[in-house]
Amino acid sequence: MLISTSISRYHRTAMHSVAASLQLLCLLLSLHRLPCSGAAAATASNFSSCLVSNGVTNFSLPTSPDYTGLLNSSIFNLRFTLPNVPGPAAVVLPESRDELRRAILCARTSSLAIRLRSGGHSYEGLSYTTENHVPFVVADLANLNRVRVEPSSATAWAESGSTVGKLYYAVGRSNRSLAFTAGSESTTGLGGHISGGGFGLLSRKFGLAADNVLDAALITPDGRVHDRSSMGDDVFWAIRGGGGGSWGVVYAWKLRLVPVPRNVTVFTVDRTGPVELIAGLVHRWQYVGPNLPDEFYLSVYAPTGSTEGNVSISFTGQVLESKEHALSVFSQSFPELGLTEEDLSEMSWIESTAKFAGLSTVDDLANRRRQPKQYSKSKSDYAQEPISRNDMVEIFRYLSTGPRGSIQLDPYGGAMARIGRAETPFPHRAGNLYSIQYGVNWDRSEVARAEEYIGWLRSFYKYMTPFVSKDPRAAYVNYLDLDLGVNNWTRAAGGSSQEAVARARSSWGHAYFGENFDRLIRAKMVVDPGNVFNNAQSIPPLNIRAEE
């Protein structure tokens, strides 16, 4: 079954943008915080001319009236809409695999860096920003969003510009007993989500999204299209969890669908009370959540702040069993939670995905514009041993003092512990009890206090050092965090020295990928030795010296 796009095509840029004078283009580049020089204007003009001559007409330049709206349409972290963030020389929305391939080649010909955006959820904006004011172009995959489900083989082909929600919608419409294992946020783009691993509510049963990739169509820097067999084992391994923006463009993914019962059990329960009581519940959860049967997912969400001395948390559960069975297991393993039959609901898996995404109806899953936008900063950790009750009390005291924000604890164990840490680039398998995601957010009226809020988050992260993984202190690449370290690219393409690779390895490289980092370097040297596809935390090649 083919699910066609449910959103209107973006406005096609008027041809007068292509013919704009270099003087006007230079002025508008400057207004959009791009280098204003004859060379920069000529580069943008050459790029647009190359696109048109190759039949790619759906793009927007800074001279276009829809440029800002189009650029901002998929920016979910408003930190990257502020005036100090450089904008791209163009935003291109290819409508086919061949248009995408031609756009990549035109960017290379015009010496423009390439940023790939499938959903715009990059925590650090790496899919639509660049460092060091390098001129760049955004290839936005939003129009490459088709999904074809084949229930008889329990597989699906999904283009990278599809969202997680649209994939879920297509799978649920095709067969009530099939599902896919990925995240709960419906507007997340598949391209970036799968490239970084893709943890979700079914991961304790079926592994990550990346663990269930059967094949892919990869466009390499030379414009060629490769499948699993022709790209080679190292590259196919790398694209399934090695982070987005390093290897080329994954145009589409072939995915293994997984069996689910016709009804699943779901719940979200809130608990509020003194710090000692709430910390005690979370302390106990550490022994329960990662050790439940594979069919059980039970996470913890804790907002910052307190009310009248009390703090609050929420437990969210999904169980691939009946309500009666779920209640029986929780009554024995976690009686402190106090679940009742009234707390639990049975529904189809597809209905549960809409519920956990905060949507009113299943049909809303296919709407990529529903998520509210905010200013935010996030960090992540992994807990490998339970935190003591006393330490958990102090952690919640610290959390109660923070600005608006939260922590999210996601249980591992199950399939996450059985899959080998070298099976894909994602190394956080056996030995990890749960992941921790920290975040702070603010609204427009608080922009002036952003550094204060981010500073609090960093101090809380530092406070957590004794309680989390060490050597390295691990992090999840889909929760990008530039505090861990960055590359320092100063041109659109070019390699890196041994020193630069060593810096990447010792900072963010080992944090995200552990011992898998060196194999990712080898894969990069196979598929993109010229470093055409790069960003502030992309995998660097080793064999070409970069400007530093």
Image: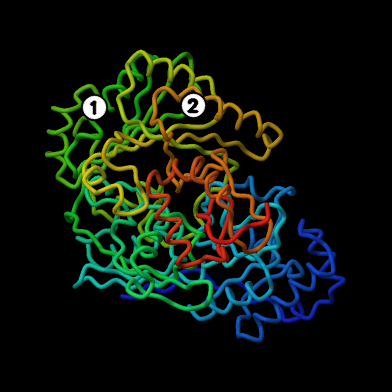
Residue 65 appears at what percent x and percent y?
73, 68
Q: Could you tell whether 69 is left or right of 202 in the image?
A: right
* Residue 261, picture quadrant: bottom left
- The mark nearer the N terminus, 1 or 2, is 1
Count of labels in the image: 2
Q: Could you tell whether 134 is left or right of 2 in the image?
A: right
* Inter-mark Cα distance, 1 to 2: 23 Å
Q: Could you tell whether 201 is left or right of 403 in the image?
A: left
Q: Which amino acid does label 2 sit on?
A: Thr
User: The residue tagged with tag 2: helix, strand or loop?
Assistant: loop
Indicate whether 42 appears above or below 517: below
Point 77% across, 56% down: residue: 33
Indicate whether 421 appears above or below 100: above
* Residue 407, picture quadrant: top left
Q: Pointer 2: what residue?
A: 304
Residue 457's disc is none
In front: label 1 or label 2: 1
Residue 433 appears at what percent x and percent y?
29, 33
Seen from the viewer's position, the closer of residues 475 and 263 is 475
Contact flag, marks 1 and 2 (Cβ < 8 Å): no
Residue 14 appears at what percent x and percent y?
71, 78
Q: Pointer 1: what residue?
A: 287
Q: Could you tell whether 406 is left or right of 87 in the image?
A: left
Quadrant of the image containing the N terminus: bottom left
User: The residue tagged with tag 1: helix, strand or loop?
Assistant: helix
Q: What residue type is labelled 1?
A: Tyr
Point 26% across, 40% down: residue: 430
Seen from the viewer's position, the closer of residues 142 and 56 is 56
Q: How crowded is mark 2: few (under 14 residues within 10 Å), some or many (20 or more)?
A: many
Point 35% across, 48% down: residue: 199
Seen from the viewer's position, the closer of residues 397 and 468 is 468
